[in-house]
Amino acid sequence: MIGITPLDAWIADQAQIGRGLTGSSWLDALRQYQLRKLNETIDHARRSSPFYRDRLASLPQAPLGTLAEFAGLPFTSASDLAGNPASFLSVSQDDIARVVTLRSSGSTGPAKRLFFTEADLESTVDFFHHGMSTLVRPGQMVMIFLPGESPDSVGDLLARGLRRMKVPSVAYGPVVDPSHAVAAAISFGAHCIVGIPTQILALARSPTGAAIGHGRIESVLLSTDYVPRALAKTLQEIWGCRVFTHYGMTEMGLGGGVECEALAGYHLREGDLYFEVIDRETGAVCADGELGEVVFTTLTRKGMPLIRYRTGDVARIIAEPCPCGSALRRMEQVRGRWSGAVRLAADCILTLPELDEALFALPGLLDYRVSVSKTRSGRFRLLIEVKTGEGSGLDVGAILRALDGVEAIRIAVAGQKLVLPGVRFRAGGPWAGNGVAKRQIVALSDTLA
Ligand SMILES: [Zn+2]
């Protein structure tokens, strides 16, 4: 029996949806609430944020009558945000409780900054509280391998949410030494582990992590980056646990959506965020089931409302109702980002998720990095740097065979567009940085599209 997502009752309460309503009338009530909140957000942003005062200047003053009208509003891009973050500020500086600065990895461009009020942070804690009740019961323990040192960091907000359901937790921080991290989780008696996909894989594939076996870790929540299926499957096999995924980014107020027990796509935080999936070329809203770019609008945020913010993430809305019985929509697991793809030939695009599915399935592989450059003859060259566990037995041949299973690589090599990938092994130990930055294919040449 699959339990209904706890987000169902939480959102019904937030949107004050009548108790008797079910199915499509329940959803209609949610859409009415969202339309009302969208109008409030537009009004607040226009009055208080210099950016939106300008951007929405030509919009009629009257409130929107339908969600279809909302789809006519302009988008907000990441570069709008990086260009002048302070122009998004919609309350006085004194009312800001936390500022988060985001620098994309390897980028020297201007950083994005996000401003949150106390009430904005409380809304995230509330989401974590309800979302986590899918994974743990009162009295169980959670080990959090996310940054949690400073007050109001993601680990701290999650720990506060868990405390409300009588679940003790430790915010350990990102994993640097997998054996130490595993030992800490075991001595704490963790039933549930929350962390970054490749870091949790490194835990499970470390000798102490693998020795935990089945029955001890009941659930894992993978967050911060999109999750390769091969990686989730490996964790299930090693620990016999359920692997849930969470979708979120700082711009969303960290939390965006979480899977229910059906493990079949995220239910979204629809009381606080309005999600759309759009056609990347035309900007039109996609029909349910169509793959496009995820766009969201904040419904309740005071410090820094965002309207139709383009995430760059690729996903689709699942049209069919969830097996858990909720009327809430689901979003299929994010498939990576548009910006992460490399066009090797006219009809041949290589994406990080394709590489992930091939490489994370290899026993002993902990993490890898891929960069792409061009040879003098104009062909592409891929360099794969592989990190393995001690005595993994992985060799270049195994990696090349796995890469040959990636359709884009096979086609590009056969068509003489790509030379055979180079493979370099790297001893254990962390990459530079704490692993929280989003993974991507690194382009080493400015000739790449
Ligand atoms: Zn569900």
Image (cartoon, rainbow, N blue to C red):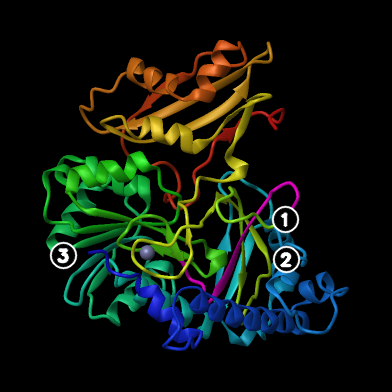
Camera sees residue 176:
no
Q: Which mark is residue 284?
A: 1
Q: Residues within 10 Å of mark 3 (few under 14, many from 20)?
A: some
Q: Is mark 1 within 8 Å of ligand 1?
A: no
Q: Within the displayed image, which quadrant is ligand 1 positioned in?
A: bottom left
**Residue 264 quadrant:** bottom left
Q: Which mark is residue 71?
A: 2
Q: Is residue 443 left or right of residue 319?
A: right
Q: Amino acid at mark 2?
A: Ala
Q: Residues within 10 Å of mark 1 (few under 14, many from 20)?
A: some
The residue that appears at 23% across and 62% down in the rendered structure is 192
**Residue 87 quadrant:** bottom right
Is 100 above or below relative to 216? below
Secondary-structure class at tag 2: loop
Is 159 above or below relative to 342? below
The magenta stretch spans residue 282: yes
Marked residue nearer the N-terminal end (2 or 3):
2
Q: Is residue 244 left or right of residue 250?
A: left
The residue that appears at 41% across and 47% down in the rendered structure is 227
Secondary-structure class at tag 1: loop
Q: Amino acid at mark 1?
A: Ala
Q: Which mark is residue 188?
A: 3
Marked residue nearer the N-terminal end (3 or 1):
3
Q: Which residues are magenta?
A: 268-283
The magenta stretch spans residue 126: no
The residue that appears at 57% across and 59% down in the rendered structure is 102
